[in-house]
Image (cartoon, grey):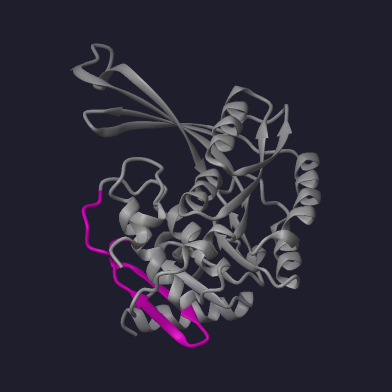
Amino acid sequence: MSMQLEMKPNQEKILSTRVLVVGDAMLDRYWYGAVDRISPEAPVPVVRVTRTEERIGAAANVACNIVTLGAQASLLTVVGDDEAGRQLETLVAQTGIKPYFGRDARLKTTVKLRVIGRQQQLIRLDFEDRPKNEVLASQSETFEKLYPTQDAVLFSDYGKGCLAHITLMIAQARAAGKVVLVDPKGSDYARYKNATVITPNRAELEQVIGVWRDEADLEVKAHNLRNALNLEALLLTRSEAGMTLFDDQGQFHVPAVAREVFDVTGAGDTVIATLATMAATGMSLRDAVPIANRAGGIVVGKFGTATVNYNELFGAL
């Protein structure tokens, strides 16, 4: 099916919309510098660091995208009782997100450090481990208090251990009539059973259903997975090829928005955050997908983990 005319949702409706984001939050650190020479110790560039920057990433970036659009977002996550965890919570609070942080002194808060030279990423260093069972249990208790007041629940799974109880959480939210969206990770999609929609990218979906021969083969495999997991829909994000929604009506494809791609970091966060915000207002997934596609097209033109505001998204409509 061809792309339909994009809707422009009422901004006042978005302002009253509430979305709960649950998942793995990270701190993104950037070290910028000049590259003037190659190291005498090894054939690598020497970066003379001149500026540093910190941004919120992963589930925190998803929540930030939601509040940037004008909706209300709460973030339920687990971090370490360390400097990075405290900095992450401070940055999250500054955005207007309502933070619900579990802490574990034995946990190292996930940090992704990117070194930038000559306007490109030279290396990324990851610091991470997994939360303990006791903290995950307390997260489930907090979830039970939060989800009844929300219009939608979004699970941002980066495979860092914050979503050990996701299957039960999905069941609780769906039983209460909430829209449930999942950005999946890994090959065990059974844990996402009964969600409203999951949003894998091409590589993530191939991990689960295998490589498809053609579009017809993809459609069969995608619908088989959707039916096996009892999902209302599956949204496949396809980078330069746009995105395809598989639902009870068949499939609905939206081509990519033509623009220069500068940095794809966090584009998936923007897509699912926009989709969740629109769905939380009562918009159908088929109406929300072109808007999410537009948001992803805008954010890849920005550097690093970035967001899109209401005027950027709808100003031209």
Residue at (31% x, 29% y) in the render: 116
Residue sitting farthest toward the front: 12
Q: Is residue 45 above or below residue 97?
A: above
**Looking at the image, which residue is at 26% across and 34% down?**
120
Q: In the rendered image, which quarter contains the C terminus?
A: bottom left
Camera-side residue of 12 and 303: 12
Q: Would you say 221 lies left or right of 110 here?
A: left
Give the residue furthest to the top: 40
Residue 143 x %, y %:
75, 53
Range drawn in magenta: 237-261
Residue 161 on image: x %, y %: 65, 45
Residue, x 62% and y 27% (percent of image)?
A: 86
Quarter of the image containing the N terminus?
bottom left
Identify which residue is drawn at 55% across, 44% down: 60
Number of labels in the image equals 0
The residue sitting at the left extreme is 36
